[in-house]
Amino acid sequence: MTNWAYFGDSVGVDMCIPTQVDAAKISDMLCSFLNRNPTLKDVPAEEVMSTFAGLNFPCDPK
C-alpha cells in the first residue's frame, strides 16, 4: 500500500506528500508558512510553492 506520493519527476521538486494530507491541509499549512514568512508574499507563486513543498514534504533519502 502506498502511503505517500512522489512528485519530483513531474514538477521538478523532490517532494513526497503523505496520502493522508489533503488539499485543505496543504492550504492551511501554506497559509501558516506565508504568515511566518511575509517577505515571500511578493515572490512568484511557483518559487513559494517549491520552497514550501521542499521544506514540508521532503522525500526520504534514496
Image (cartoon, helix red, strand yellow):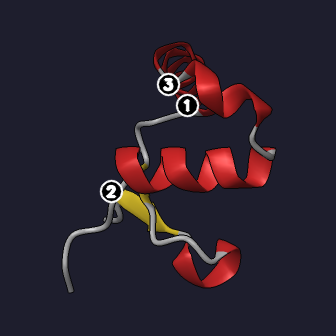
Residue ID at (46%, 17%): 36
How far apart marks 2 and 3 lie (CA) works out to: 24 Å
SS of the residue under disc 2: loop
Residue 20 picture quarter:
top left
Compare marks 2 and 1 and give the one earlier in the sequence.
2
Residue ID at (72%, 27%): 41
Kindly identify the amino acid type of the residue bearing the numbered disc 3: Phe
Residue for badge 3:
33
Residue 60, percent across and down? Answer: 21, 70
Residue ID at (43%, 48%): 19
Is 8 above or below relative to 21? below
Kindly identify the amino acid type of the residue bearing the numbered disc 1: Ile
Which label number is shown at residue 3? 2
Residue ID at (65%, 45%): 48
SS of the residue under disc 3: helix
Is residue 49 in view from this perspective? Answer: yes
Residue 8, percent across and down? Answer: 54, 77
Q: Kindly give the residue lying farthest to the front in the view shown.
A: 39
How far apart marks 2 and 1 lie (CA) works out to: 16 Å
Residue 46 picture quarter:
bottom right
SS of the residue under disc 1: helix
Compare marks 1 and 3 and give the one earlier in the sequence.
1
Residue for badge 1:
26
Which label number is shown at residue 45? none
